[in-house]
Every structure is written in C-alpha cells, then in structure tokens.
Amino acid sequence: MATNYDAVRWTVDAPMPGSLADPTRAILGPVRDALLFWGAPLFAFLAVELWLGGWALAAPHDTAAIALKGMFAVIAVTTWAHLIAVVPRAYGNRTVFAAHRGKLTVAPIALIATLFLSPLALVAAGVLAVFWDIYHSAMQNFGFARIYDMKAGNPPEVLRRTDLRLNTLLYVGPLAAGAALATHLQSFAKFDKTALSTLASLPGVLAGYNDGIRAVAVLAYAVVLGWAIVDYRRAMRAGYRLPAHKLATLVATGTVSIIAWGFTPPIVALAVINLYHAVQYFALVWVKEGGRMTHAAGGRQSRAMLYFWGGSILFGLAYAAAMTGSVRVFLAPFIACSLLHFWYDSFIWSVARKHV
C-alpha cells in the first residue's frame, strides 16, 4: 500500500500534536516552557555549574570567591523574594480570596502574633520551614505534572496518587541519600537553650544512622519508581496519554535532583534547586495573575511588572537583613511568610478544581 509521507510531515508551523513543540500542550509556549518550567531545573543546574567553574578557572582565587559569594547571595534573595509572590494570587484574585477568606485573614494574624510572643514558637517555626520547604518543592513539581496532564485532556484523578508518590520521592529520595540531609538536620540546633533543648542533639544522634537512612532512601526510591512504571503502563493500556511535557518535567526534575543532591556540595544543590523553584513560581504567578496586576496598575504592564518584581526583591532583601541581624524577633513576620506561602500553595492552586 502506498503511503503519502508528505501528509504526515510535521513542520514548525504545524508541529506534531502532543510533542514538546505543540503550543496547545504548553503553559506559556514551547520555548518559554522549556526555559521557565519543565526545562528550568536543567538550565539552573548548568547556570550554577558554569558560574562556579568559569570563575574558578578564569579568575584569581580572591576574585572568584567574591563572585561565588555574590551568586549564592543573589539566589538566596531570589528564593526569599518568591515567598511574597504568592500575594497577587491569594489576595489579588477575587475568586481565590472569596473561596478562602477565613484562611487568608485570620491565620496570618494569629501566626505572626504567636511568633512575636513566643521565642520557642519562633524557633520551632524556623525548623518547620526548613522541612516543609522540602515537601513544598516536591509538590510544585507535582503541580506542573498535573497541569500538563490537564492540558493533554487527561482526567484529574487519573494517576494522581502515583504522581504524588513519584514527585515526592524524586525530590526527597536523593536528598535523604546524600550529604544535604545532615545540612537540613542542623536546623534542630536552634532548639539549644530552649525548653526543647533535647531536640538540638538530634543531628548527632541521626549521624550514627547515615548508612541506614541512605539505604532506606535508595530502596524507597527504587520501589516508588518501579511502582509508578507499573501504574503508568496500566493507565496507558486503559487509554491514558502521557504528555510529553509531563514526561520532560519528571525526567528533568529527577535527573537534576539526583545529580545535585547526590553529587554536589549541599550549598550548590540548594542553590540549583532554589533557583529553578523560584523561577518557575515567578513565571507561573505572572502568567496567571499578570493580567489582573496590569489592570490594577491602570493597564500599564511595565508598572505592574515593576510593582511585582520590585516588591518581591525588596521583600527578599528585607528577609536577608532579618536573617543576618542579631535580633531574632525581627524574623517573625518573615518566617511566618515562609510557612504561609507553603500552606497557601496547598489550596490556592488546584488542577482538580481547575484553579490554575
């Protein structure tokens, strides 16, 4: 039988349906999604490694040290800046605010007051933020995977639990198996000289079980990955269509997570992960709420961008100042913002309710 190959030739103007080049399956578009969403982990890793390697090779030691400290400082400020970027979504979107009015008004006041009044609560909140951030980052990856499922027309409940397990272990597994776990556990040292000072010894206690923790993490990773493969094969036999963008998200995130957490110093891994996480979040908020912000700014997009980006950076700088200051109580509103950011994101975005 003759085949008309010209009829199935895909071009730039008419890309193959469902491919990474298909604009109908992308959030911002094929190129911008590759840069800001599914490809962001890879670009963040390359950017950090090239910056580190380039300065180490091309400049004197003292100059390179300044450049490296500058990079880590910029990424830290960007990370803290993205925390306040939740505000346009939570408070500027009337639909979201009306649906969660109580959570968005009573909870912030109660939390900030508690952290101001209780030094122990402030310490506990700071430690909680360190570990909640791990889960929060994994859930952002989960959210992008689900958005790409929605864009492909897949029902929101299909493979949801599988994706929840998979995205959690893609991020947490390598972290728990690498040196970064000890870095995170050091946050418990903040409990020293508090009523819960016993917790300050936890890092030292767990250090004796590093090999066991690593073995459990690797085993859990393998089990969840194998479980996901079985679930995906079963779903695809039943008609599920695996979106190319979702697959790219999982592969890029999983690869960078293993390399960063498993084979680079913890500070480098944190820089990579925090950089791509913040870039993804800023891009998502702007694409979903940028129109409302522009309308509120009198229709001037440049002014809206200045308020959004400028305000976020100023908050990041203020957070940095509070972190380096000697008066711990000044940290209260910033630690509260971290926890509220993590919590808000659990309900102001929802693929199942199509609130994305």
Image (cartoon, rainbow, N blue to C red):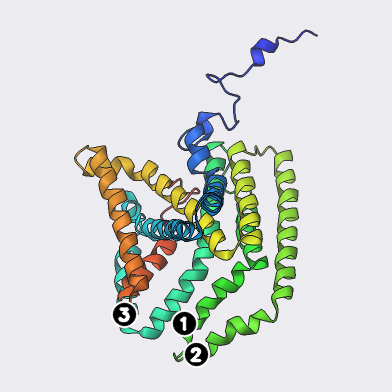
Residue occupied by mark 3: 327
Tell me what residue is drawn at x 50 percent, y 52 percent. Answer: 59
Residue 171, compared with residue 117, is above or below; it is above
Answer few, some or many: residues within 10 Å of disc 2's Cα (few below 14, many 20 plus, some between 14 and 19). some
Indicate which disc residue 190 carries.
1
Callout 3 secondary element: loop
In this rendering, would 264 be left or right of 224?
Answer: left
Q: Earlier in the sequence, mark 2 or mark 3?
A: 2
Residue where numbered disc 2 is placed? 197
Question: Residue at the spot x=57%, y=87% of the render?
Answer: 201
Q: CA distance from mark 3 to mark 1?
A: 14 Å
| Residue 29 against residue 337 in the figure, above or below | above
Residues under labels 2 and 3: Cα distance?
Answer: 20 Å
Q: Position of residue 101 (x, y in %)?
A: 31, 60
Quadrant of the frame with the N terminus: top right
Quadrant of residue 297 within the rendered picture = top left
Q: Quadrant of residue 17?
A: top right
Residue at horizontal 53%, vertical 38%? 34
**Which amino acid, mark 1?**
Lys
Residue farthest to the front?
Answer: 60
Q: Is residue 113 visible?
A: yes
> Which amino acid type is shown beneath numbered disc 3?
Val
Q: Earlier in the sequence, mark 2 or mark 1?
A: 1
Crowd class of label 1 (few under 14; some 14 to 19; many from 20; radius 10 Å): some
Q: Are marks 2 and 3 in contact (CB under 8 Å)?
A: no
